Amino acid sequence: MPFDTTIILGAVAYDPKVVSIWEGIREYFNDAGAPFDFVLFSNYERQVQALLAGHVDIAWNTPLAHVRVQHHTHGQSLSLGMRDSDRDFHSRLIVRTDSGISSPKDLIGKKLAVGSADSTQARILPLHFLKESGADLNSVRLLLFDTDAGKHGDTGTSELDVLEALRRGDADAGTVGDLIWVMEQAAGHIDTTLLKSVWTSPPFDHCMFDALPDLDAGKIERFTSALFAMTWDNPEHRRLLELEGLKKWMPPREEGYDSLRVAIAEQGYPL
Amino acid sequence: MSTESTIAVAIDAGDLPMGGGLMALVRPALLLLEPGGVLAINSCHDSLQDDLSVWCRIKQHEYLGHEPAPMAGASGTTEGSGCHDSSVGKPKPTVRHLIRRGDLSVPQGSRETNMRLEAVNGRLSAEAVLSAVPMPETADPRTGFAPRGAQVEPGGPRYPFDLLDRNHVAPPEVAKLYDQAVESQWDGNRDIPWHKLPMHSPDLERAIGQVFTFLAENELSALYVPSRFVSRIHPAYAEVAMFLSTQMADEARHIDVFLKRARSGGAGLGVSSVTTSQSLLSLLELTDFTEATFLLSVLGEGTFVDLLRFIEDHAPDDVTAEVVSRARNDEARHVHFGLVHVRHALANDPGLYQRLENAVRRRAAVMAANSGVPEPLQDGLTILAAGSTTYRDIARGHDEFRALLDEMHTNRIKRLEHAGFTSAQANTLSELHTPNFM
């Protein structure tokens, strides 16, 4: 059987638009001389398994899945690229205006709503950074919203649950990613007399294209060449870039995941 | 950080948080800027920079940073209204945030300016609107249902509109005809003196029932045929769709009153003939808008106007006369639209005459087996014109019917010449026209 040059990419179907995105990117890659197909998974755990088993060439991974791939390949996996919008994410501490909380230290004895267990921006990193900022988490009662397990927070559902819990008064404070907080405000969904942001975490990075160290060099070359050739000025490219939420594909950088590696170790999160 | 001279627009945001209405100031202000233009937001809200920088990243604007607002009176600054910190009893410091507008979703075209439509004699007509906002020569299916003149964000879906060319869709007179149509609407329940209908002989009433059955059947086709084109007309030419909607409302009313007339005198409906059915199907199956307008409105409804006048002239009572008189006024407007549409298209498309002739020939070929006016209709019209079924009256009615056919032919030629055809072309087309009239 001849060697199949088709690049097989795995992505998680967290929303129906994922199909449109990758159908469009497949057409673009094939036209650009990089034979391409994709496989959709229902969760990142299955996708990481498939990558490690060699069933897909490249996985479009969340930060948690990225760190997991690196863990299982002893740091040898290849990082191929990320979105400009994956750089410098933040988490926010949102509080009820009547809670008396103005900084992480004020969380003592309060109820804190947090997002899904596998959400980097709504649970894992905000708890890590809040602790670094002086919050005594042992004296905080956590209200957990574990929805869409396996999607690693991509759907944003648990973050909306956190905001709703705050609105109802079920919690004094809550943690969400800054994307949700800003978009919900801009859409007019937030009552700013009830809720406000009092703390912003240090920056961290989000998604990454991961591959195993032995991926065919030709595939890597074709994938990255076609990927980085996408430009905002080309209307066909722009449609795909807008759907995927970026203006420009960027080379990988690893320092944006350092805090997550520390947080996972500290919280004993299973990899 | 930017210098004063690069700031194109400045807004005073007081202490509004992002989720507290701030965006209703920021977004419209950015819309006033060209991409690359800088907006200054003077705000005394704490830590707005975190929210603005994230929002700018999502929306592909550039957050340039923040700095203490210059003193009041300098360019782009305000007095910092609403920025009083009641807890300490003194004004809160005002910060100036700077945003450079990006090029994501920048609407095409510029905002309409100086749009001050003025009523003339208390009326604001569609014709005046068309004059203020002319139709483009061609239209882009990606602008969807955006009204002509709106700024359209790029990246919208392609709509299935395929009538995208002003020359073949929109005659300049269309808005005026729409105004006339709206003004001429009437009520088939109230405006016909139904209570005045006298009793006629059963033979005459059956003839009337037959004639109105034919009229209603043809008007049903005149309702359905334009409907097939409305959804294909690009909204840049909305006045055409709007006019056709009045035409369809007219046809609906005609169907209603024609059937009411047939059922008011005791005879009820008559026969629907195969000739009529074949003729109307060949209209319904047309896919070219200009061909359909030509066959339906110029040839079909034009001939129908002559038929309605004939019925009116020979109507045995005021109710029947009123029904067809009102319908004829509406039909004359449809014919007018057809004429100006075809004339406009012919003037811009030298190959159109041949296409129209071919369409008429194709239809004539379909109708080849049916050489005459549908028999039930011919008999109905003859008896109607006779006024009775005595043979002397029938002889006169028959002559009247034959005169009607001649008159229809003569008037078709006049209309065709008016639409821009030569006499020879007009004669050919009229000869080929369907024996079903419509």
Image: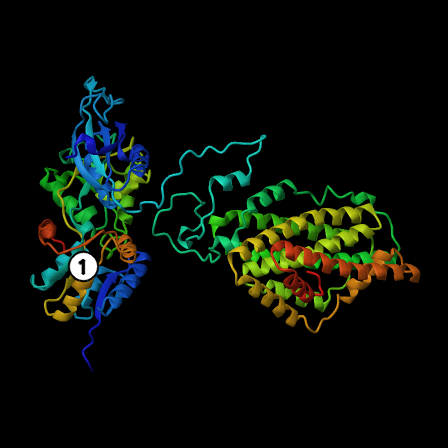
Residue A133, located in which quarter of the rendered image? top left
Q: Secondary structure at mark 1?
A: helix
Q: Residue at x 49, y 49 (%)?
A: B237
What subunit carries mark 1?
A
Left of B259 or right of it: where is A88? left
Q: Position of residue B44 (x, y in %)?
A: 22, 27
Task: List the residue tagged with mark 1.
Answer: A228
Q: Residue at x 81, y 56 (%)?
A: B208
Tally of numbered discs = 1
Q: Residue at x 45, y 58 (%)?
A: B160
Q: Nearer the viewer, residue A19 or B41?
A: B41
Q: Position of residue A43 (x, y in %)?
A: 24, 60
Quarter of the N terminus of chain B within the rendering: top left
**Mark 1: few, some, or many residues within 10 Å (few <14, many ≥20)?**
few
Residue A112, located in which quarter of the rendered image? top left
Q: Residue at x 68, y 72 (%)?
A: B368
Which residue appears farthest toward the top when viewing the image? B89
* Amino acid at pointer 1: Phe
Q: Nearer the viewer, residue B305 or B191?
A: B305
